Image: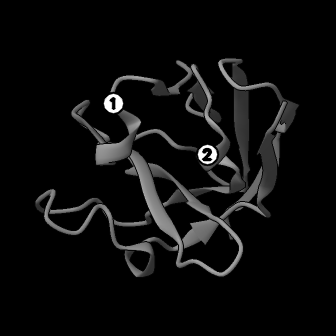
Amino acid sequence: QVRLVQSGGGLVQPGGSLTLSCAASGGTFSNRDIAWFRQAPGKEREFVAHLDWRGPINYGNFVAGRFIISRDNSGNTMSLQLNDLKPEDTAVYYCAAKSVAFVSSNDVWVPGRYDWWGQGTQVTVSA
C-alpha cells in the first residue's frame, strides 16, 4: 500500500512563495501520474496541477504560470512550488497519485481518478 506524507505549507503574505512536498512510502512516483489538488472551506476539491509519468504537465487555469509541479529523480518525492501567492490561494493542498497511468489527459483534473492521497497541508495567504 502506497502512503503519501506531505510537508510544507503555512502562513505567507500575498506575493510570497511556498514549497509543498509529498513523500511516498511503500512505492514510488516513478512511472506514475501525480497531481496536486486544493480545497477551500465550503468548496469542492479543485485541480491544481498534474505531472504525467511520461513528462507532460497540466495546470489549472487559475495557476497562470505561478506554480510548478515536479518530481525528484529518485521518484520518491513530488513537490509543488507556489509563487506570487494570492489570498484566494488559501486552501488545504493535497498530493495525489494514480496506480495505473492515464490513457489520455481528459480526466487528470478529476479527484476520483486518483488512488492515493496525502493528508493535506494548510496554505494561508494573508497580510
Residue, disc 2: 89
Seen at 66% across and 66% down, the residue is 40
Residue, disc 1: 64
x%, y% of residue 7?
84, 40
Above or below, 35 relative to 47: above
Q: Quadrant of residue 66?
A: top left
> Closest to the observer: 30 or 79?
79
**What amino acid is found at the position of numbered circle 2 in the picture?**
Asp
Seen at 67% across and 42% down, the residue is 87
Asked whether, in this view, residue 118 is left or right of residue 124, the answer is left
x%, y% of residue 76?
64, 35
- Mark 1 to mark 2: distance in Å? 12 Å
> Closest to the observer: 105 or 124?
124
Asked whether, in this view, residue 117 is left or right of residue 65, the answer is right
Q: Residues within 10 Å of mark 2 (few under 14, many from 20)?
A: many
* Quadrant containing the C terminus in the rendered view: top right
**Outermost residue, right side:** 11
x%, y% of residue 89?
61, 45
Secondary element at tag 1? loop
Which of the two labelled residues, at mark 1 and mark 2, occupies the earlier sequence position?
Answer: 1
